[in-house]
Amino acid sequence: MRVLGIESSCDETAAALVTEEGEVLADVVASQIATHGPYGGIVPELASRAHMQAIIPVIREALSDVPGGLEGVDAIAVTQGPGLVGSLLVGVQVAKALAWSLDKPLVGVNHLDGHLFAIYLQRQDQGEPAPVPTMPYVGLLVSGGHTALYRVEGFSDIALLAQTRDDAAGEAFDKAAKLLGLGYPGGPVIDQLAARGQADAFSFPLPMASRKTLDFSFSGLKTALVRHVQQAGVPEGEQQLADLCASFQGVIVESLVRKSVLACQREGIDQLVITGGVAANRGLRARAKVACDENGIALFVPPPISCTDNAAMIAMAGVHRLTDGERADLSFAVYSRDPDRRRGKFRADGTLVEHKPE
Ligand code: KG4
Ligand code: ZN
């Protein structure tokens, strides 16, 4: 089965063609960074308009090298949520129109499932097929809108273990970069600067340091950076700026890695997948490798191109549901927030007492 994936939840318009085995036959992403860059963040109305302009050319390009073009598509998977409603509607309406006119099966996919299953994509330019995890695994999803830990049991069986109480990690990177005058998006530029800096040059408090909770929090760290800049100003020297970025990034990375290892230990699982845009961060990838090796955990991180938003991951998350015969009714609606997946018994501080599979 060849599944056309369509993604338009945020600021990337994307289309891809993926086989049942996860082989990526085509993968096109049109980024809106140039549109939103001057505003230091995503402007929803501009995002919807840019999706409208890009969606048909992006789908055409994705199918241009595929024998049979649209006729070679067996089914369609589209991001249904969470995301910006105006943006989601563009992809969903086009997907519905294609599914109806071609009489092909369609499923709506949760964008976060896409990130969690991106690890199963096999890209031709990757060389040797990368090792993949077996289920269950612990998934750390770190993106611009979400930071959460999941227990992934199956393609339709994902339980939320913990999440951020305020800002997402990517949001913290983006806000810090804006404050430091480094442009948007902040993650890649802070990543680059941090690689040349000393992570112990400035001291920032480690958020949610207690081992009692798996939850994250990044707004206090952001405030600490704001205070630092108010008192000391934005560093003028390049090395000092690199040191500040390394120190800031180091605290985010440490928090993400500690909670991920703790989640594996609590769940009795020895496989960790790190995914989402922030998983492209070199500091996070390196630190997670060391911590996983120390704790006997096998680490799986998709290549950076599969970590940031793309449509191949949406096709991947939909393919098993489609092969199982699932078909969406064409009247389905989009959703802006992730539906509550928390299940089992939780203590007041959010820690899991007992995992209860449905
Ligand atoms: O997954 P993604 O492309 O979109 C969302 O679903 O949010 O993630 C985008 C986020 C942005 O906040 C961006 O700054 C961050 O991922 N990001 C990074 C890196 N590349 C992208 N953060 C840290 N280091 C990177 N190399
Ligand atoms: Zn995303």
Image: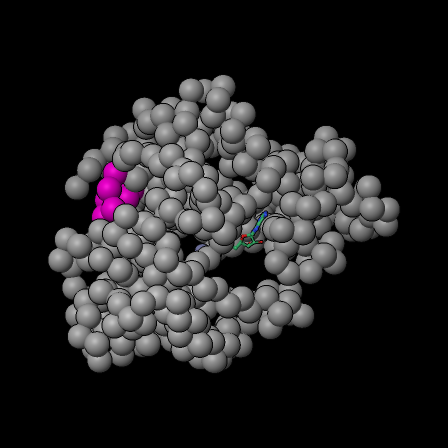
Task: Work out which residue is located at the far right of the displayed protein and give it.
Answer: 237
Query: Residue 300 placed where, x, y %?
Result: 42, 35
Which quarter of the rendered picture does the C terminus lie within?
A: top left
**Is residue 153 visible from the viewing direction of this image?**
yes
| Magenta stretch secondary structure, dominant | strand
**Is residue 273 visible from the viewing direction of this image?**
no
Residue range highlighted in magenta = 153-159
Tally of numbered tags? 0
Which residue sits at x=25%, y=72%? 71
The verdict on residue 155 being magenta is: yes
Which residue sits at x=39%, y=39%? 129
* Left or right of 210, for residue 317: left
User: Dividing the picture into quarters, in which one does residue 347 lie?
Assistant: top left
* Left or right of 212, for residue 291: right
The verdict on residue 281 being magenta is: no
User: Dividing the picture into quarters, in which one does residue 313 lie?
Assistant: bottom left
Query: Residue 211 placed where, x, y %?
Result: 46, 26
* Left or right of 227, for residue 173: left
Between 23 and 355, the one lying in front of the other is: 23
Quarter of the rendered structure image containing ligand 2: bottom left
State whether residue 337 is above or below residue 229: below
Query: Residue 357 placed where, x, y %?
Result: 19, 37
State whether residue 5 is above or below residue 51: above
